[in-house]
Image (spheres, grey):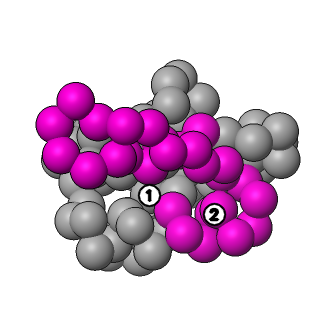
Amino acid sequence: MTQLRKGALELAILSLLEREELYGAALVERLGNYPSLAAPAGTVYPLLSRLTSNNIVQTRWEESPKGPPRKYYSLSDAGTDALRHLQGDFHTLTRDVAALIGEDKQ
């Protein structure tokens, strides 16, 4: 389950960022709403850093009403393309695994 979860985490993060721009802690919180995708900040921030380095995610700073400025993350154009690719791969994988599991029951 751990390896499946790691692979799905990037897809989940990009999916959330497609819906809205989020700062890191809010992203961690949103993932926490889905128990199988909940991840600590120590997992999410390095992934965000990699996605930013690969130009999949873009960032901007905004002053916070409480505390220090927040770094907001959003999808770049390349990120939107990457998300579409990952979604297609995920749907193909889940379809094939569902078919294989169904074959075992016949």
Pick the front one: 14 or 62: 62
Q: Is residue 92 magenta?
A: no
Say whether residue 67 is visible. Answer: yes
Residue 9: mark in rendering = 1
Residue 32 in the image: x percent, y percent? 19, 45
Residue 98 against residue 48 in the figure, above or below: above
Residue 30 in the image: x percent, y percent? 27, 37
Residue 75: mark in rendering = none
Residue 54 location, quadrant: bottom right
Stretch of the chain drawn in magenta: 48-74
Q: CA distance from mark 1 to mark 2?
A: 12 Å
- Tell us which disc is closer to us: 1 or 2: 2
Q: Would you call the spot at circle 2 few (<14 residues within 10 Å), some (14-19), or many (20 or more)?
A: some
Q: Would you call the spot at circle 1 few (<14 residues within 10 Å), some (14-19), or many (20 or more)?
A: many
Q: Secondary structure at mark 1?
A: helix
In the rendered structure, which disc, 1 or 2, sits on the residue that comes first in sequence? 1
Name the amino acid type tagged 1.
Leu
Q: Is residue 62 magenta?
A: yes
Pick the front one: 74 or 34: 74
Q: Which residue is mark 2?
A: 51
Query: Is 12 on the left or on the right of 50, as rendered?
Result: left
Residue 17 against residue 85 in the figure, above or below: above
Query: Is 54 on the left or on the right of 93, as rendered?
Result: right
In percent of the image, x 60 and y 72: which residue is there?
A: 50
Say whether residue 14 is visible. Answer: no
Pick the front one: 72 or 33: 72
Residue 33 location, quadrant: top left
